[in-house]
Image (spheres, rainbow, N blue to C red):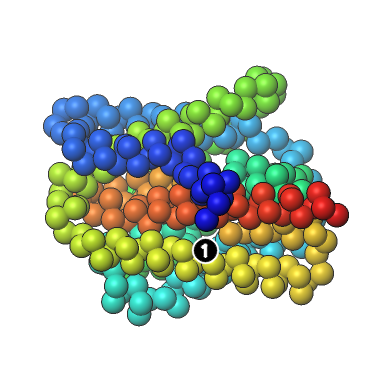
Amino acid sequence: MSHPLLRRLRPDNFSLALIATIVLASLLPCRGGFAHFMDVLTDAAIAALFFLHGAKLSRQSVLAGATHWKLHLTVFACTFVLFPVLGLLIRPLGEWLLTPGLYAGVLFLCTLPSTVQSSIAFTSMAGGNVPAAVVSASTSSLIGVFLTPLLVGLLLAQHGGVSGKAVVDILLLLMLPFVLGHLSRPWTGVFMDRHARMLKLSDHGTILLVVYTSFSAAVVGGLWHETPTSALIATFAIDAGLLTAVMLINVFASGRLGFSREDRIAIFFCGSKKSLASGMPMARVLFAGQAASFGALVLPLMMFHVTQLMVCAVIAQRLAARARVR
């Protein structure tokens, strides 16, 4: 393996920070009063994050999506239909190789919306349809606030599903700040457009807070004592298999549907990725009463996050190089 390829496969700085946070929570979990303080701080950070996302999303970009509905429907089908179907199809394998919590985490992963920043970045790097990627990824994230809790309730019925309180909490903690942020856009829009990096830092900081507080509770509840190493390895293999299957089906379907090269690239990156930025806050609300098993429920998502970034980085650079040769 060449050195350039090794550099491309190296996890990004945020993924390394994610791993470091898990290690910190495993060695120094927060307890007692400090844990309660961190929970309140994390909820406040989540509400602020969704307010910023609402302020960033322009109404024009959402309306522009109607002009390329075939592409967006294809992305949504990959995100909210194909992934859940594959998650259910691997049930026998998941129940054999994984713990119940880890398999429930795989199903939760399958219900999540697409990423925003990285989908757009990889589409741009590979020479794809960037405006379409912006609309698809942003709209997927918005729809996911409503659709993910419904899919979780359907797919995880035997794991307790989601309660009415969890749906109300989603609306109050995630959707209400998002709507308020969007309504504030006439006053905050210019500032958000000029300080896009602030949203990325807010994304990352909030995720690390959620990971630390949630993993602390899971570690105190005995996460690492109850999860065998073989199940962790199997989780990574299943994540990699899911990503590979979706990418292959995605390439085949977008080709058969007659999309242009630029559109196929946008569909490929938006339709094969899952959002850690949306997933961690949603998991915190949806599984609020399952602190002891929370770590297992989100481990598949975090493994998938690192895997998709590494794989997509290599593919995007190869597509870009192929375009330059043309």
User: How many circles with numbers are drawn on the protein?
Assistant: 1
Given the current orientation, which residue lies at the most extreme front position?
Answer: 2
Tell me residue 36's x, y (percent): 22, 31
| In this view, 133 is above or below 153 | above
The residue lying at 74 percent from left, 50 percent from top is: 321
The residue lying at 42 percent from left, 30 percent from top is: 205
Mark 1 residue element = helix
Q: Nearer the viewer, residue 55 or 316?
A: 316
Residue 41 visible to an observer of this rendering:
yes
Instruction: Left or right? Give the position of 285 relative to 275.
Output: left
Tell me residue 263's x, y (percent): 77, 57
Q: Nearer the viewer, residue 69 or 105?
A: 105
Tell me residue 176's x, y (percent): 50, 37
Residue under numbered circle 1: 243
Residue 183 visible to an observer of this rendering:
no
Image quarter of the C terminus: bottom right
Question: The disc labelled 1 sits on which kind of residue?
Answer: Leu
Instruction: Left or right? Give the position of 200 relative to 170.
Output: right
The residue lying at 40 percent from left, 66 percent from top is: 237
Q: Quadrant of residue 208?
A: top left
Tell me residue 174's x, y (percent): 47, 40
Instruction: Left or right? Give the position of 228 relative to 143.
Output: left
Q: Quadrant of residue 93?
A: bottom left
| In this view, 120 is above or below 92 | above
